[in-house]
Image (cartoon, rainbow, N blue to C red):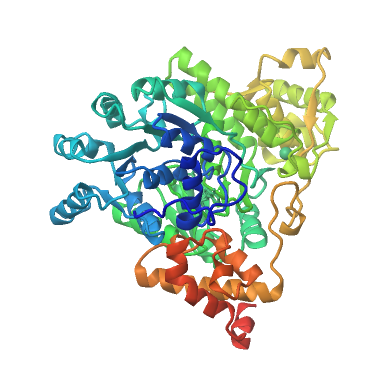
Amino acid sequence: MPVAPPDPEAAPSDAPEGTPQRLQQARAVLKTVFGYDAFRGLQAEVVEAVLAGRDAIVLMPTGGGKSICYQLPALVRPGAGLVVSPLIALMQDQVDALRQLGVRAAFLNSSLEAAEADAIERDALEGRLDLLYLAPERLLTARFLALADRLELALVAIDEAHCVSQWGHDFRPEYLGLGLLAERYPDVPRIALTATADAATRREMREKLRLQGAREFVASFDRPNLRYVVVDKADARTQLLRLLRDEHPGEAGIVYCLSRKSVDQTALFLQRQGLAAVPYHAGLDAATRRTHQQRFLREEGLVVVATIAFGMGIDKPDVRFVVHLDVPRSLEGYYQETGRAGRDGAPATAFMTYGLADVVAMRRLLAAGGASDDVKRIEQGKLDALLAYCETAGCRREALLGYFGERYEGPCGNCDTCLTPVATWDGTLAAQQALSAVARTGQRFGAGHVIDVLRGKRTPRVEALGHERLPTFGVGEALDERRWRSVLRQLVVAGMLVPDAEGYGVLRLGPGAAAVLRGEREVHLRRDPERRREPRRAARGRGPSQPELEPSARARFEALRAWRAQRAREQGVPAYVIFHDASLREMAERCPRTSADLAEVAGVGATKLERYGEDVLGVLNAPPNPLASRARR
Ligand code: ADP
Ligand code: ZN
């Protein structure tokens, strides 16, 4: 794009003394094109390195702002930037968003007609492109490489670079071929980006992509705007409904379930409750999946109920919640899936329900699986880490980041255990009673029957087996059923009870049980908080809070949203590529009267100002419409 020469007036004055001119220019482009006043986190350092022609490996969490790291240098350096991305389906939205900023962007993939692809290749050759997105298999064709040989390349960005790892679950063999770029274009800076944090993946990226000399930029993986909440599963659907209605009315989010069947049932349940919800799983035909994904991206406030087949690369910025109704497979999966919420930096919720049945099922699956002992040991370790996270009485953020090797000192003030500290209690006697009930009933029953015996319930089964005559019958009357489930769950997590490999939820004594029964070992248990309403929005903790807009600003915000929806429909693009919610909020709050004032709002660059400025000022400064404000209630 015709980048404005560095204009000292436009550059924010906070640029430190002696900042290289390149970086000054980059700051000016950040403001004029993207509408942002300052770089975030490591962006400035990455941009500076790439502008200096160096290779870079960039690890930032989702929402950390990776795109600027390559989009901006591609605009400042001469020539076109190539962006390798594995997800053809999402290229269109990325390119649409760039075009809204006035950036000359295009993609090449199999969805294009030959004539369209030819035109794009011509644009590239004649220097009319700033950014060109394509899948790795396309880049590696002889035809494209021959074209690339003739292009002036500003840089090559390799997005989702962890796809090169053979051990990761996103492995894409075509990524392995990208190493050849090192020899073919030795003078073109390459930048590999990912939100996958572990050191092994990083080493593989460096080696396979031949980025030996690259500088490594590792951001904190904390997502301060995400509120982590894990609750004891009582009635998962009611818990879900309460969350959606009380905390996130009219907002978009993802609800993960383990099985296709529970996806379908949960989506139906939400629809019957009057919520806009659709299912997504691998059992639906491709067209339905595509429509549901498109609706999620384009509509406001849609809930997608899905298996983990949904979500990779979804870069919708305003996902306000991610719910796990079933326990995720690992903390890696949990981090990645919850990370899809709140990319825009505004408050969002990561909510999980978790119960005894989940723990029993997961432990059993692992024991019964046909994997080799080595694999089982690794999976065992991952499962233990996940369960420890669920059971922690400490700060969840501290536990989660600690698992990824990052030190974080809680309390964070934005997770359930920080907001409502969890008490622990001496559960030694309860543990002895439970273990003894399991032993006396012959290690042949599941939790339900064991709890009946403990609580002294004369069910037909209890009487048929004569279990009312056992010495443990009725010893545990003091605790209700929910508390007993919590005790058993924690004993399973601690390995004192183990699910029988044959199934049906049968519990047997585990290795740690004997010491407890002999009174040689104390047991400390977590007291699951009583069911209560989740803290309301207004009571947000240390994480960035989003105060309610005052009524007149709220009215302006709604008017802007309606205007945005209409412009998005006309152009066939998602609403957020026109303006993010955060920009609309700021406009509604500050209510600028002039185009110069409007340009101060984050996310308003020169092109958007020109395109939409007059409209926005018109909406903001229109006399209030009494009908509209009544309709909102
Ligand atoms: P990632 O690709 O790392 O998930 P994105 O590049 O999509 O993250 O950026 C996440 C969000 O942060 C986007 O909404 C983007 O507009 C915003 N953003 C990025 N950089 C800045 C910045 N310097 N100032 C303000 N907002 C930014
Ligand atoms: Zn915390």
* Vertical side of 249 occupied by 541: above or below: above
Residue occupying the point 51% across, 18% down: 378
Residue 356 pos. (x, y %): 65, 35
Relative to 499, 109 lies left or right: left
Q: Is residue 57 above or below residue 353?
A: above
Placement of the N terminus among the 4 image quadrants: bottom left
Is residue 481 visible to us here?
no
71, 358: nearer the viewer? 71
Where is residue 214 shown, x and y percent of the image?
42, 25
Identify the residue shown where x is 45% and y is 48%.
Answer: 261
Q: How many marks?
A: 0
285 or 23, nearer to the observer: 23
Vertical relation: 69 (above or below) 473: below
Percent x, y for residue 215? 47, 26
Q: Residue at x 80, y 38 (%)?
A: 422
Picture residue at 57% right of the left edge, 49% below the top: 38
- Quadrant in which the C terminus appears: bottom right
> Can you give x and y, in whole percent of width and height, for residue 15 in the image?
59, 45
Q: Place residue 192 in its image quadrant.
A: top left
